[in-house]
Image: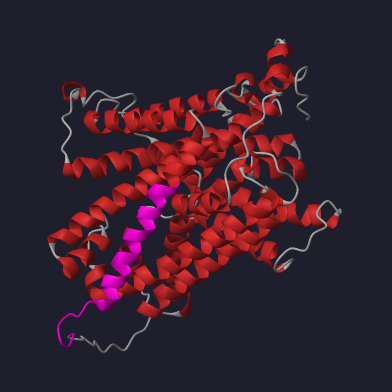
């Protein structure tokens, strides 16, 4: 049994509601716009898709994301507490389902995203300033042949230091982290707009040679549908992260109004930029040339190099660095608020609910998040882990939409919801298709992802039994 006094004391220190609508919009945009905006045109061009088909994939992915935004907007009116999706699931279905989602985010999804973004940022910096590898002597030492903690030690050390620095900024006040996000995301958007403008004003050869091949066989309907579905998945990956702002509702002014607005405006900004950016890619370089690029190459760098020469390549490298840094900073801000809310409800380590008396931040939760993310950086397994949650991610996405319909039907949500009931129905059907498709195409990864989520079950009962006398975790 834990001492209830610290729990009572911490609950008297609320979080600061200091983030306005503009910061909320830039948080949504900052998390969404990452490397996908600069790279995904390559795998999309390697399908059977035409240029209009690729643009259509970006539009459809944007519309699906917007339907998801409408769904979350309806749920945002239920509460002004932090926790976002965890809180929505808790109110709709109870603590058990909500805990499994939160456990997945802590162990894999959120912490893995922070680790991956820190590593990408460090890799980008390494292309300009090469890091020495002080632990290179032990680079071949492994744990089970899967984990090589000393490999790429210079990049990993810099990644961990970056997490530590941004954690320090977030620890000292959400307003500081929000201000940094505004500057970095503003610079990111400005850089993308410059590339778009340069691309539309680019004048290449007087006439492009168009190679037309005549063939007697054409891809069938299902082949084309599969190709479009693959392109759609690439686009959806680039849109990912838009819902993360819901975790920080407890520090946003008038969250029931501003959280839905921030999501819808942020998604709209990203959608417009993505569509224009991909039009520029295909305007400057023919689809056939984009399709022959190595998938490790950054298409935006190649396009910028054509438009502006070596200076353009450098600009895109810096832009990718800024994008990764901005998304990393935003993730370090938002994810700990989920663990903070879980702890408040007795579903996590009790100290994770402590609020700093001076900075008014969930400082213990912030430290928990950064510590585990740093461990994932060192292990180098974050990419594997985050790939495993594709299956469960869409499973919870569909569950949230079901929760909206449930809460609307029982009268808990009385406000009008945009595009209801079509938006949650489409989200449910789309999530179901993706879950089934992923289970068929990647059965091992899907099963492993499901097992990792289920690994939270014993922890649920551990926290329930430990904290039942303090915060009353229900079954």
User: Percent position (x, y) of residue 199?
Assistant: 27, 73
User: Percent position (x, y) of residue 269?
Assistant: 48, 64
Residue at image position (51%, 44%) is: 389
| The C terminus, quarter of image | top right
Q: Is residue 412 visible?
A: yes
Would you say residue 219 sits in the magenta stretch? no
Most extreme residue toward the right, as rendered? Answer: 411
User: Percent position (x, y) of residue 449?
Assistant: 52, 41
* Up/down of 108 relative to 29, above or below: above
Residue 462 occupies which quadrant of the picture? top right
Name the side, left or right, on which 67 lies relative to 475: left
Q: Is residue 286 visible?
A: no
User: Percent position (x, y) of residue 46?
Assistant: 31, 68
Would you say residue 207 sits in the magenta stretch? yes
Residue 1 occupies which quadrant of the picture? top right
Q: Nearer the viewer, residue 307 or 12?
A: 12
């Amino acid at each position: 049994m834990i001492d209830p006094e610290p729990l009572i004391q911490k609950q008297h220190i609320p979080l600061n509601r200091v983030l306005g609508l503009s910061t909320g919009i830039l948080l949504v945009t900052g998390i969404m716009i990452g490397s996908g905006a600069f790279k995904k045109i390559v795998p999309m061009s390697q399908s059977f898709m035409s240029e209009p088909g690729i643009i259509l994939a970006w539009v459809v992915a944007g519309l699906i994301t917007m339907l998801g935004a409408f769904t979350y907007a309806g749920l945002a009116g239920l509460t002004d507490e932090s926790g976002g999706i965890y809180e929505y699931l808790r109110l709709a279905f109870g603590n058990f389902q909500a805990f499994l989602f939160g456990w997945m985010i802590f162990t894999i999804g959120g912490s893995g995203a922070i680790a991956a973004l820190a590593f990408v940022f460090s890799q980008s910096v390494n292309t300009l300033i090469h890091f020495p590898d002080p632990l290179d002597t032990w680079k071949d030492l492994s744990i089970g042949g899967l984990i090589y903690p000393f490999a790429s030690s210079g990049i990993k050390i810099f990644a961990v230091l970056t997490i530590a620095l941004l954690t320090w900024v977030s620890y000292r006040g959400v307003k500081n982290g929000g201000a940094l996000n505004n500057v970095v995301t503003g610079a990111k958007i400005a850089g993308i707009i410059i590339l778009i403008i340069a691309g539309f004003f680019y004048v290449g050869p007087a006439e492009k040679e168009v190679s037309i091949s005549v063939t007697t066989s054409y891809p069938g309907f299902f082949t084309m549908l599969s190709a479009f579905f693959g392109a759609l998945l690439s686009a959806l990956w680039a849109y990912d992260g838009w819902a993360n702002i819901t975790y920080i509702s407890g520090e946003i002014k008038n969250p029931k109004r501003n959280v839905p607005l921030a999501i819808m405006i942020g998604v709209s900004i990203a959608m417009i930029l993505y569509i224009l950016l991909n039009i520029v890619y295909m305007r400057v370089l023919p689809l056939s040339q984009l399709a022959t690029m190595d998938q490790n190459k950054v298409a935006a760098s190649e396009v910028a190099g054509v438009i502006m020469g070596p200076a353009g390549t450098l600009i895109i490298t810096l832009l990718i660095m800024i994008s990764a840094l901005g998304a990393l900073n935003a993730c370090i801000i938002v994810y700990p608020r989920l663990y903070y809310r879980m702890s408040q409800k007795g579903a996590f380590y009790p100290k994770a609910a402590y609020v700093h008396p001076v900075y008014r931040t969930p400082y213990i939760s912030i430290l928990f998040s950064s510590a585990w993310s740093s461990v994932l950086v060192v292990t180098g397994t974050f990419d594997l882990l985050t790939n495993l949650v594709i299956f469960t991610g869409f499973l919870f996405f569909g569950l949230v939409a079901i929760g909206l319909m449930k809460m609307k039907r029982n009268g808990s949500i009385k406000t009008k919801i945009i595009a209801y009931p079509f938006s949650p129905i489409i989200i449910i059907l789309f999530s179901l298709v993706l879950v089934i498709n992923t289970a068929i195409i990647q059965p091992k990864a899907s099963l492993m992802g499901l097992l990792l989520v289920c690994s939270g079950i014993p922890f649920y009962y551990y926290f329930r039994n430990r904290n039942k006398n303090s915060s009353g975790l229900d079954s």
